[in-house]
Amino acid sequence: MKQEPYIPVSAVMTRTVHTVDSMATVRQAMEKMAAAKVGSLVVDRRDDKDEYGMIVVTDIAREVVARNLSFDRVQVYEAMSKPVVTLDPAMDLRYAIRLLVRQGLGRALVQGGDRQMLGVVTLRDMVLRYAAAQDRNGGGGAA
């Protein structure tokens, strides 16, 4: 039996996390996305007992553009997803990929044991990293 490479989520995640307040307008969120050249922002928690949210371009398309609403009148909390799927930084990439695929998601938040935000990981980055590891090991495996 072929040994699958172990790659932790932490090896692929982006540690720079761009955030936005839930009370910001969608236009303000889009400006932050454009400036940072990212397709998503993590929505800050109100307190330690709250959960993180996330707003992605598809949320804006679905909740604002498709409904013909104003970017200046819709606030982030009205368009975001909350709670977000979170991954443990030590989770094997294969299982993280499976989880996101089953949930129909393109990204997840990486949280430490203390519920602190450590980074964000995208399905794209995980699949590319996993494929590169497979190529180095001389074969394709099932993810």
Image (spheres, helix red, strand yellow):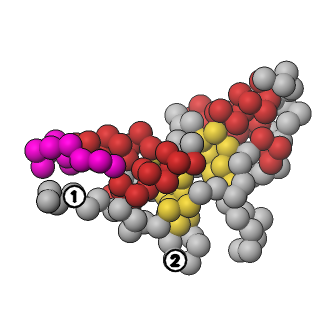
Task: From the viewer's side, name the closer residue of 45 and 125.
Answer: 125
Q: Position of residue 133 (x, y in %)?
A: 21, 48
Which residue is the site of mark 2? 113
Residue 136: in magenta span: yes
Residue furthest bottom in the image: 114
* Residue at the image position 57 percent from the left and 42 percent from the top: 104
Label 1: how many Cα within 10 Å (few below 14, some 14–19, many 20+):
some
* Residue at the image position 84 percent from the left and 25 percent from the top: 67
Q: Amino acid at mark 1?
A: Pro
Q: Please state the extent of the stretch shown in magenta in the rendering.
A: 133-143
Depicted 90 relative to depicted 136: above or below = below
Depicted 70 relative to depicted 82: above or below = above
Residue furthest front in the image: 1
Q: Quadrant of the N terminus?
A: bottom left
Residue 107: in magenta span: no
Q: Inspect this view and state whether residue 32 appears.
A: no
Q: Amino acid at mark 2?
A: Gly
Which residue is the site of mark 1? 5
> Marks 2/1: CA distance?
24 Å
Q: Position of residue 27 (x, y in %)?
A: 76, 32
Image side of residue 78 versus residue 29, left or right = right
CB of mark 2 within 8 Å of CB of mark 1?
A: no
* Residue at the image position 80 percent from the left and 29 percent from the top: 64
Secondary structure under tag 1 reads: loop
Image side of residue 28 versus residue 142, left or right = right
Task: From the viewer's side, name the closer residue of 99 and 22.
Answer: 99
* Residue at the image position 15 percent from the left and 43 percent from the top: 139
Depicted 71 relative to depicted 38: above or below = above
Image side of residue 129 versus residue 101, left or right = left
Label 2: how many Cα within 10 Å (few below 14, some 14–19, many 20+):
few
Q: Inspect this view and state whether residue 11 appears.
A: yes
